[in-house]
Image: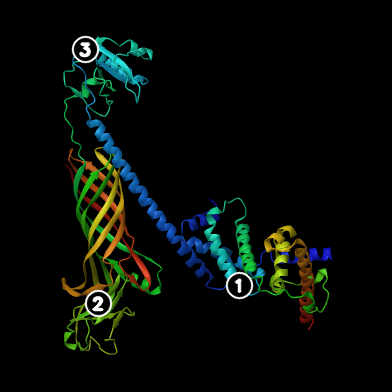
Amino acid sequence: MSEIKKIIKGCLAGNRRDQELLYRRHAAKLFAVCLQYSGNDDEARDILQEGFIKIFENLEHFKHEGSFEGWMRRITVNTALEKFRCRHNLYRVDDIDTIKEPDAEPDNQDYAGLDAKDLLEIIRELPTKYRMVFNLFAIEGYSHKEISKIVNISEGTSKSNLSRARVILQRRVGSYTGLKKKVVNE
Amino acid sequence: MNEKGANIDLLFRNGLKDYEVLPPPGVWDGVHSAIKIKSRPIILLRIAAVVTILLTVSFLTYKWSREIASTTSVSALSFNVGAPSPVISVPFDDPQYLTAKRNNQVRNSSNVKIEPLNYGTISDATDVAFSPEPIMNIQETKSLSIGNNTTVRGPLLALPNRSQVNSIYIQYPDLQYLLVNNSTIPVNRWSIAAMASPTYYSGISSGSDQLSNKVMSSEQPLFSYSGGLSFSYKISKRFSIQSGLYYSSLGQKVDGINSYSGFTQFVNTKGDHNFEVLTSNGKVFTTNPDVFLTANGSDRILTAYTKDVFDPNKASLQPVNSSLNQNFSYLEFPVILRYKIVDKTIGINLIGGLSYNLLVHNSVYTTLDGKIYPVGDTKGLNPLNLSSSLGMGMEYNISGKLSLNLEPTFRYYLNPFSVTTGSFIHPYSFGIFSGVSYKF
């Protein structure tokens, strides 16, 4: 029996040590996912907590047929989406025109200078609806049709949001790389 | 734009692929408390389900055993004296019956017809047409020596149809053993046992904190014992249910508590106790005004007479001991289910059940020159505890009625003796019970 199977078995038997072990092993990766989908740290924390509660509650339904990490990630993303659906009326989708123009247009080579922390920061600066669509399309690999159902928008809006998200991200990436270059040169 | 878009997608997908951020502390606590609360009803439901299944199985076994008993006590054989030829019914599809029949009685009989017994139906005595073939050859043999009013009894006999007065229905071939007088054989179901055992007693801490761990580390089990009488009722061949009355004495030694005598003359405060000592099983309150207590380098003692207020050495108090003994006595009412795995001269039983433990005595003392020096008692103890038992019993049958028993038994207390420092100490004990049992 693989180690993860043993841990899952222990969790299902109510073994606290195995439950904590499962959490400690995967919490950091899943928290990064939560940060990616949320606008602030408190919300990310809530998503992580609720996501893990669902993971433990549904552990008996995991059939060991696919990646366990992928299964946990899907639950976490779904939890983030549930939160989004509950609150999206409260969010204001910023108009693209109000976003500050970047210092420079990035090129492919500029991308190389960014690390994961920078990328996460950039993605979290996106307006919520754009962030959701971009994450679902570009990171999770959903189609616009699927996104339209998940986020309850039309396919056209999904495409439009993705397009706007990409524009913003490209500009942001440019800003970051420009700033970094400046810092390095100075 | 599409190429740029794909590039930006890839940049983020690959860049964030294996990124990890440590979550803030406290998330796990929130997760754990939520899953713990939700799992409790499931555990309770499972316990309830197990109890229900046990009770149902016990009831059905009891019913079944009663039915078997009533079946065997009914007269299974009757025939009309004037009938020309009583008919013995046998299961037609069982070759061993036929073989045995030939070898034993039937071969030596005459005027007896053999009729196949079709389970669930009783054939007419005059209808002797049957199959298979071998049975046909053993009709009309010598007469059986069955007198008037003779009754054949035993578990292997088929129930007769009362209207079938011309027939004898016997399923088993060895008729000599089946023909007995019309009397009832008593079934011994009740037995009494006297058992006793020294027990090892300790506790498991759940939700423990630093203080309770520290407290528990200074405690050692004392000699404990348990014993009593039990009655057992055999509900079937393998199952029996047992109850009775046991007395058990449990104790522990609390190290690091120095006691002194001669404090009475210095007591100047009002109240029912001068000292409180924290233990894993509750707080010890001193009831003896003569005792003075100090703790070795810990804050386990709560008192108005702290070191800066009163020094026992300066007051020339007499040192008594450096530890306290806690003792608890319980009356136990067990409800135990036994399953006989091996039923031979040396029998082996699987034992499991619950006990209700009623607290009847609780004292704290220390010793001075081998004599008991009372200190006080433990407060906050649960007056009634529920414990579960699991064991394996060995039974050596000396005679039909008397047997020696040896039963290693593990006992776990489902609820703690008391709640201390926010942690729960679930005591457990292990003992090897020995004794004798007598079957009525």
**Which one is closest to the eye, mark 2 or mark 3?**
3
Tell me if residue B122 can be seen. Answer: yes
Where residue B13 appears, x then y in whole percent? 72, 64
Marking on residue B238:
none
Q: Amino acid at mark 2?
A: Phe
Q: What's the CA distance linking mark 3 and mark 1?
A: 97 Å
The disc at residue B143 is 3
- B378 horizontally vs B94: left or right: left
Tell me the amino acid under the disc marked 1. Answer: Glu
Direction front: furthest residue: B163
Place residue A50 in its image quadrant: bottom right
- Label of residue B285 in the image: 2
Depicted B301 relative to depicted B154: above or below: below
Please give the residue where the numbered disc 1 appears in the rendered image: A43
The answer to which of B208 and A40 lies nearer the viewer is: A40
| Depicted B355 relative to depicted B269: above or below | above
Foreground pick, B336 / B150: B150
| Quarter that holds the N terminus of chain B | bottom right
Give x and y (percent) for residue A85: 64, 67
- Up/down of A171 relative to A15, above or below: below
Check the residue under mark 2 and report the chain it is in: B
Could you tell me how far apart the alpha carbons at marks 2 and 3 are, in whole angstroms?
Answer: 88 Å
Give neighbour class at mark 1: few <14, some 14-19, many 20+ (Cα, 10 Å). some
Tag 2 secondary structure: strand
Tag 2–tag 3 contact (CB < 8 Å):
no
Which image quadrant: the C terminus of chain B?
top left
- The amino acid sitting under disc 3 is Ser
Image quadrant where residue B83 sits: top left
- The image quadrant of residue B371 is bottom left
| Residue at image location 25% in from the left, 81% down from the top | B275
Disc 2 versus disc 1: nearer the observer: 1
